[in-house]
């Protein structure tokens, strides 16, 4: 008999927002697969003998073979949901990032991997949840005006990469939800997350403008409101989250 447990593939879950989302998904008993360049990072926290619902695959999000392995569930079908929180390390003194095409390449590889697997007869329609950032809206400012210098100059390279990533998911024909978080910090889960909704075609439906959200809050919100619940209300939408 086929399992009814939701299957979720994670990219970028060894730290930050992705790690938080993975942690809460495992605690809820979901069957998870995580692609990790250094598996020991997750293995030391989630030992195999005590976390049987986690499969860790060694690889890179820009390697289509590893990506294809990660998004194919044990039953041979595509996973139910894909959570991608990949990003490149900042180089502050250059006002840039180590890989200015990290997110756009990851999106292209993921979309191609899904298409290739389908061409081989693999079935399934995974819902893609991609973590991005505020400051990318085409329908008006979605961040406090005081942050304009940081967004316009310091984060310009990262934002340019994430905008292309977002556009690729929107145009892919796959079901998606894009999460634009405000500036991330390492604070604890202490606040209620506020949510704004934007349709990439018709514009802003509601607004939530704020300065910060912790990585733990962002990942927990994704797990509780997207992974563990039906996503129809947020399907093919862009969400702004902040505290």
Image (cartoon, rainbow, N blue to C red):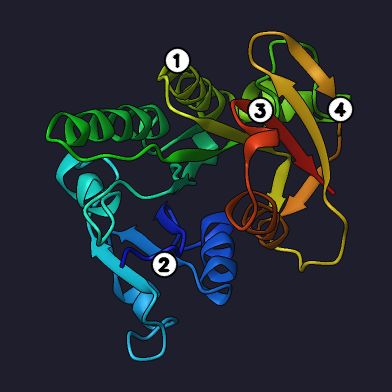
Residue tagged 1: 171
Residue 95 in sight in this render: no
Residue tagged 2: 31
Disc with the residue nearer the chain's start (2 vs 4): 2
Q: How far is the residue under mark 3 from the one under mark 4?
A: 11 Å
Residue tagged 3: 238
Is residue 117 shown above or below 185?
above
The residue located at (63%, 42%) in the rendering is 231
Q: Work out whether residue 198 or residue 74 is closer to the camera in this orientation and state it.
A: 74
Q: Could you tell me which secondary element the residue under label 3 belongs to?
A: strand
Q: Residue furthest front?
A: 1
- The mark found on residue 98 in the picture is none
Q: How far is the residue under mark 1 from the one under mark 2?
A: 28 Å
Disc with the residue nearer the chain's start (1 vs 3): 1
Residue tagged 4: 207
Are the residues at dot 1 and dot 2 in contact (C-beta closer than 8 Å)? no
Q: Could you tell me which secondary element the residue under label 2 belongs to?
A: strand
In the rendering, at what x and y percent does residue 160 appear? 51, 20
The residue located at (81%, 32%) in the rendering is 196
The residue located at (36%, 61%) in the rendering is 34
Q: Could you tell me which secondary element the residue under label 1 belongs to?
A: helix
Q: How far is the residue under mark 3 from the one under mark 2?
A: 26 Å
Q: Could you tell me which secondary element the residue under label 4 belongs to?
A: loop
């Amino acid at each position: 008999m086929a399992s009814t447990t939701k299957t979720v593939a994670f990219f970028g879950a060894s730290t930050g927002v992705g790690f938080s989302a993975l942690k809460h998904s495992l605690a809820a008993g979901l069957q998870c697969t995580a692609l990790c360049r250094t598996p020991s990072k997750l293995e030391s926290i989630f030992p195999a003998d005590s976390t049987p619902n986690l499969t860790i695959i060694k690889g890179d999000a820009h390697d289509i073979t590893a990506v294809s392995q990660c998004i194919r569930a044990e039953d041979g079908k595509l996973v139910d949901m894909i959570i991608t929180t990949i990003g490149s390390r900042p180089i502050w003194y250059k006002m840039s990032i180590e890989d200015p095409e990290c997110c756009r390449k990851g999106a292209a590889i993921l979309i191609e991997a899904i298409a290739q697997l389908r061409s081989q007869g693999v079935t399934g329609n995974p819902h893609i949840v991609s973590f991005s950032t505020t400051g990318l809206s085409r329908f008006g400012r979605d961040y406090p005006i005081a942050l304009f210098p940081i967004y316009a100059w310091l984060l310009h390279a990262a934002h340019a990469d994430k905008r292309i990533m977002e556009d690729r998911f929107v145009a892919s024909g796959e079901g998606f939800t894009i999460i634009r978080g405000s500036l991330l910090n390492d604070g604890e889960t202490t606040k209620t997350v506020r949510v704004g909704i934007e349709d990439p075609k018709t514009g802003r439906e509601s607004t939530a403008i704020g300065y910060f959200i912790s990585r733990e809050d962002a990942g927990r919100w994704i797990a509780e409101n997207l992974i563990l619940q039906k996503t129809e209300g947020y399907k093919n939408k862009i969400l702004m989250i902040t505290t």
